[in-house]
Image (cartoon, helix red, strand yellow):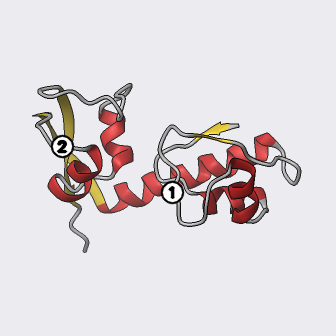
Amino acid sequence: MIQVAVEETIGHYASWLQVSAGEIRRLNGIRYGTHIRVDQRVKIPMDRISKAQFEEKRFEYHEEMVQDFFNAFRVDQVQTYRIRKGDNIWKLCNEVFEVPLWLFLTYNAGLDLDDLKMSQSVRIPVVEKIASG
């Protein structure tokens, strides 16, 4: 059993484990088209690779994602934002502040995404594209 991290999908697990996504879906009773959520617990079959091999592939995926981001962007500053009625983290990250969820969570360690409160303060990294050339 693992806990889903930001940006992970059943497809990632299937690839890392060398099994079909359908096998993981069946094992967890997840219908096709249903997405997994961050922090959700998922059973994974560990009969083709070791847990250490799985964790290495998982670690490499996240490292590459972070490297790719910081090759193109830098954090210019950090601002404080107060949660308002109707806010959700997905909308704030993707539409309002345009920062990846994993970066937002880096600056808000321990934040329970399912229990945001009105007027709660969160830290928002302000990113800037790195000039190329």
User: Which of 122 and 66 lies nearest the eye of the viewer?
Assistant: 122
Where residue 34 sits: x, y (%)? 53, 59
Label disc, if present, on residue 87 of the rendered structure? 2
Q: Position of residue 110 (x, y in %)?
A: 38, 25
Dot 1: element: loop
Q: Amino acid at mark 1?
A: His
Left/right placement of residue 106 relative to residue 35 reads: left
Left/right of residue 34 with respect to residue 24 in the rendered view: left
Q: Which residue is mark 1?
A: 35
| Quarter of the image with the C terminus in it | bottom left
For the residues marked 2 and 1, what is the alpha-carbon distance in whole angstroms?
21 Å
**Residue at point 35%, 37% (across, down):** 105
Identify which residue, 48 or 128, lies in the foreground.
Answer: 48
Among the 4 quarters of the image, the one containing residue 130:
bottom left
What residue is at 17 percent from the left and 26 percent from the top? 120
Q: Amino acid at mark 2?
A: Asp
